[in-house]
Amino acid sequence: MTASSIEQLIKTLAKLPGLGPRSARRMVLYLLSQREQVFTPLLTLLQQVNETVTECPICGNMDTDSPCHICQDENRSYAQICVVQDVTDLWALERAGVFKGRYHVLGGLLSALDGIGPEELKVQALLQKIEEHPVEEVILALPSTMEGQTTIFYLMDALPKDKVKITVLSRGVPLGSELDYLDEGTLQMAFTSRS
């Protein structure tokens, strides 16, 4: 590696969430000092993940299988669909073990400032799921942010209230928080006390 390629690697790693230039520099130095034990296996795994992981065409999860392992699980009921902002929220709920139904990843939240309207989200796919399967409840597990609340209000208007019960996570999720940053106990409380 030349000095410029090392700097490029540091700049690229610094773009990852939770890492800045200092952390990225330390990480690169560690990887270079541990080439056989860490760097080479990491390269192999990154390449493998890049080639094999796809977005599930049913729920939007990321997995090596298509459809994903959650959608293939016949023990999961279509009676409940949990709507989440992105895959990190889906994974947070799965870690907490509080939901045994199906998921729907919206792919973002409504945001007029960022130019994200209903057309940029997977709202039509959600409505189609409700038409195709006997869904009893749609759980809106979206963040308690301004964009999350706006999206919840939009979905409450768009969803067929005469066909499905619509619930929203309540107690336990603090205002302004993201689901991925909450502990499992808080998620469980919010999920069981939804309204």
Image: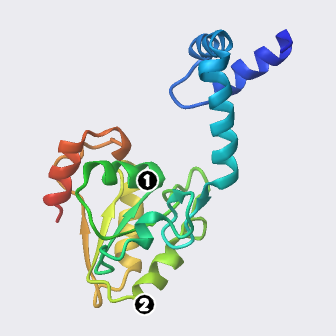
Pick the residue in front: 82 or 166: 82
Can you identify the residue that label 2 sits on? 131
Between tags 2 and 1, which lies in front? 2
Q: Quadrant of residue 160?
A: bottom left
Residue under circle 1? 147
Q: Residue at image x 25%, y 39%?
A: 183
Label 2's element?
Answer: helix
Amino acid type shown at disc 2: Glu
Question: Which image quarter holds the N terminus?
Answer: top right
Q: Which amino acid lies under the numbered mark 1 shown in the image of this protein?
A: Glu
State the CA–CA distance, disc 2 to disc 1.
26 Å
Q: Position of residue 166 (x, y in %)?
A: 27, 75
**For this view, does 54 lie left or right of residue 173?**
right
Q: Secondary structure at mark 1?
A: helix
Image quarter in which the C terminus is found: bottom left
Query: In the visual, does 106 lie left or right of 30?
Result: left
Kindly tell me whether residue 144 is visible in this rendering.
no
> Which residue is at the front of the view, 37 or 190?
37
Eyeballing the image, is 182 above or below 42? below
Q: Quadrant of residue 151?
A: bottom left
Q: Crowdedness of circle 1 by 10 Å Cα count: few (<14), some, many (20+)?
A: some
Name the spot of residue 111 as percent of width and height, x first.
Answer: 52, 55
Q: Residues within 10 Å of mark 2 (few under 14, many from 20)?
A: few
Q: Is residue 22 left or right of residue 69?
A: right
Q: Residue at coordinates 58% horizontally, 19% vertically from top-left? A: 20
Q: What residue appears at the point 34 percent right and 38 percent down from the top-left corner?
A: 181
Residue 182 position by quadrant: top left
Mark 2 or mark 1, which has the lower sequence index? 2
Residue 189 is situated, as x and y percent measured from the top left of the image, at 15, 51
At 60% from the left edge and 20% from the top edge, which residue is drawn? 37
